[in-house]
Image (tube, rainbow, N blue to C red):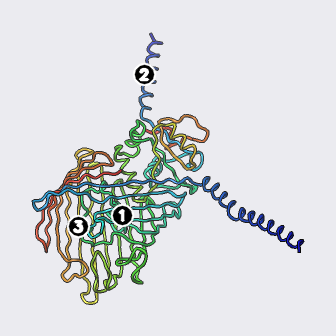
């Protein structure tokens, strides 16, 4: 009996020793190896930036002070081929209990497949036109204070959660492409609300320095009952968007023109077309001072039900003064003519910074 | 009389050579990754973030002098054809569009050369290369200096 208990104690000691060794082999060594190799193979590089703008507006004989979105950016090189981009916006939202809301605008994990070809997964700015693909929420980059009308009137889907393949600067024409499959309009950030997927196919070329020509096609099926921009869509909509864009930001002259043709089809109304173009032009008087003009127009076909039909024209005239690359002052007058609300005049001054 | 004229001519030619080298830049790289010879168009494509991998597949890492340094200003004006502010804005926009990784910017040529020598795939622009074992000068269109 005594002999047995001694053997048992010895066995336990041996087991504990083995167990420690096993733990060491299974956990500690791999961690050491991983740390050793990870420190040898890459050094992570992360950049965090923010953007904010202050505003003064004069509209309907009333002067108001305010501020825009506070935009927080994170760009991180995780290793030789893997990178991350995050963009989160803090904005004034009257309906929120705290009067502010947090919105995740972009979460993109990018994997470099080969050379200039990448695989991206996450929440993207839909690469449907130049403005949406080039400017994010940081106002310091915008050539004007506000986005073109086709953004504020929700003509195009600004974000898509999905997966895409992207290529850039290929060949002599510096050809680029984006092919994206996403959840589509009406979906939540983590679930699609229907079986249909949105598809975005975009191409562009840069035939000469500072010039970019692009075109895209977007298709989606929006289910009946989808909630989009606080509106419930009460019928199924097949949406097709065709976009073309020309962007030239020269040493003196700046021209950006884009147009989207939207074709929305429902069983009851058939195909209804909406055309939403804009043209921006600026001229650098000096390196820092740029007067500019922008003309926007949206024309809806009679019987359009998916959009809030309100034919509209806007003329924007302004002046941009670039203090440095992280600070810009803009003064802008905007005249709008709306089918529903008539004429509107607004004077805005903006001080946008990056930090 | 003739030796004096000869001496004056020598000093003049030295002065002209020195003047022509003012503002000249040298492209340096780590011994690993970058080729020894590049066309100017290739160099520009690399520095604009258009080409992001070397021929062997390794990642290109760009090292530049800060735009408030003399070499940084010359780099932005002569290679990028941009003002200092334009260059900074160009890179900030490219990084936050998710199109390219940010270059590393430096205050001194010694810091830049040290970075390039320690990072395989790195390429940098300096006014002149001071010797380092792990660095080399890239020949651009047959020349070791670019204007």
In the displayed structure image, the side of residue A119 where residue A259 appears, left or right = left
What whole-number distance in Å separates the C-alpha atoms at marks 3 and 2? 64 Å
- Badge nearest the viewer, 3 or 2: 3
Q: Nearer the viewer, residue A97 or A181?
A: A97
**Chain letter belonging to callout 3:** A
In the rendered structure, find residue A179 and report the number of the disc placed on it.
none
Q: Residue at x 31, y 73 (%)?
A: A242
Residue positioned most to the top = B1
**Residue B46 x %, y %:** 47, 51
Which image quadrant is residue A282 in? bottom left
Residue beneath label 2, please? Answer: B12
Residue beneath label 1, please? Answer: A133
Q: Is residue A160 above or below residue A90?
A: below
In the displayed structure image, the side of residue B120 where residue A92 appears, left or right = left
What whole-number distance in Å separates the C-alpha atoms at marks 1 and 3? 16 Å
Q: Residue at x 45, y 38 (%)?
A: B107
Residue positioned most to the bottom = A268
What kind of element bears circle 2?
helix
What whole-number distance in Å separates the C-alpha atoms at marks 2 and 1? 55 Å
**Residue A207 x %, y %:** 37, 58
**Residue A113 x %, y %:** 53, 64
**Chain letter belonging to callout 1:** A
What kind of element bears circle 1?
helix
Residue beneath label 3, please? Answer: A149
**Chain letter belonging to callout 2:** B
Which image quadrant is residue A52 in? bottom left
First-in-chain label (1 vs 3): 1
């Amino acid at each position: 009996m005594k002999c047995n208990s001694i053997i048992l104690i010895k066995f336990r000691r041996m087991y504990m020793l083995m167990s420690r060794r096993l733990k060491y082999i299974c956990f500690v060594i791999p961690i050491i190896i991983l740390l050793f190799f990870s420190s040898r193979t890459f050094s992570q590089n992360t950049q965090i930036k923010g953007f904010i703008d202050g505003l003064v507006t004069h509209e309907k004989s009333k002067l108001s002070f305010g501020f825009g979105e506070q935009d927080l950016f994170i760009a991180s090189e995780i290793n030789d081929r893997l990178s991350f981009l995050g963009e989160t916006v803090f904005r004034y939202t009257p309906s929120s209990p705290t009067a502010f809301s947090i919105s995740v605008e972009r979460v993109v994990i990018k994997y470099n497949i080969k050379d200039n070809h990448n695989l991206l997964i996450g929440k993207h700015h839909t690469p449907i036109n130049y403005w949406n693909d080039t400017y994010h929420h940081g106002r310091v980059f915008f050539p004007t204070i506000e986005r073109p009308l086709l953004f504020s009137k929700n003509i195009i889907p600004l974000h898509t959660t999905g997966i895409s393949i992207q290529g850039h600067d290929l060949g002599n024409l510096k050809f680029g492409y984006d092919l994206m499959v996403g959840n589509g309009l009406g979906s939540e950030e983590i679930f699609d609300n229907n079986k249909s997927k949105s598809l975005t196919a975009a191409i562009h070329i840069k035939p000469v320095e500072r010039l970019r020509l692009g075109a895209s096609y977007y298709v989606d099926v929006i289910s009946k009952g989808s909630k989009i921009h606080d509106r419930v869509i009460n019928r199924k909509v097949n949406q097709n968007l065709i976009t073309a864009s020309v962007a030239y930001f020269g040493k003196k002259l700046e021209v950006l023109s884009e147009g989207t043709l939207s074709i929305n089809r429902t069983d009851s109304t058939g195909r209804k077309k909406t055309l939403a173009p804009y043209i921006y032009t600026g001229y650098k008087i000096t390196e820092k001072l740029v007067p500019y003009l922008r003309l926007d127009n949206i024309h809806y076909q009679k019987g359009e039900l998916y959009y809030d039909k309100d034919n509209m024209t806007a003329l924007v005239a302004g002046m941009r003064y670039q203090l440095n690359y992280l600070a810009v002052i803009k003064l802008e007058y905007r005249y709008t003519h709306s089918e529903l609300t008539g004429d509107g005049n607004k004077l805005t001054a903006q001080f946008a910074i990056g930090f | 009389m003739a030796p004096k004229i000869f001496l004056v001519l020598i000093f003049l030619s030295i002065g002209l050579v020195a003047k022509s080298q003012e503002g000249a830049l040298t492209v340096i790289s780590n011994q690993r990754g970058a080729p020894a010879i590049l066309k100017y168009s290739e160099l520009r494509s690399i520095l604009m973030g258009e080409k992001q991998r070397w021929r062997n597949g390794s990642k290109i890492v760009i090292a530049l002098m800060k735009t408030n340094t003399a070499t940084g200003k010359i780099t932005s004006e002569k290679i990028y054809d941009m003002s200092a502010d334009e260059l900074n804005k160009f890179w900030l926009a490219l990084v936050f569009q998710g199109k390219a990784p940010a270059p590393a910017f430096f205050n001194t040529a010694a810091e830049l050369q040290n970075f390039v020598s320690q990072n395989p795939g790195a390429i940098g622009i300096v006014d002149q290369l001071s010797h380092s074992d792990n660095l080399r000068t890239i020949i651009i269109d047959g020349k070791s200096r670019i204007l």
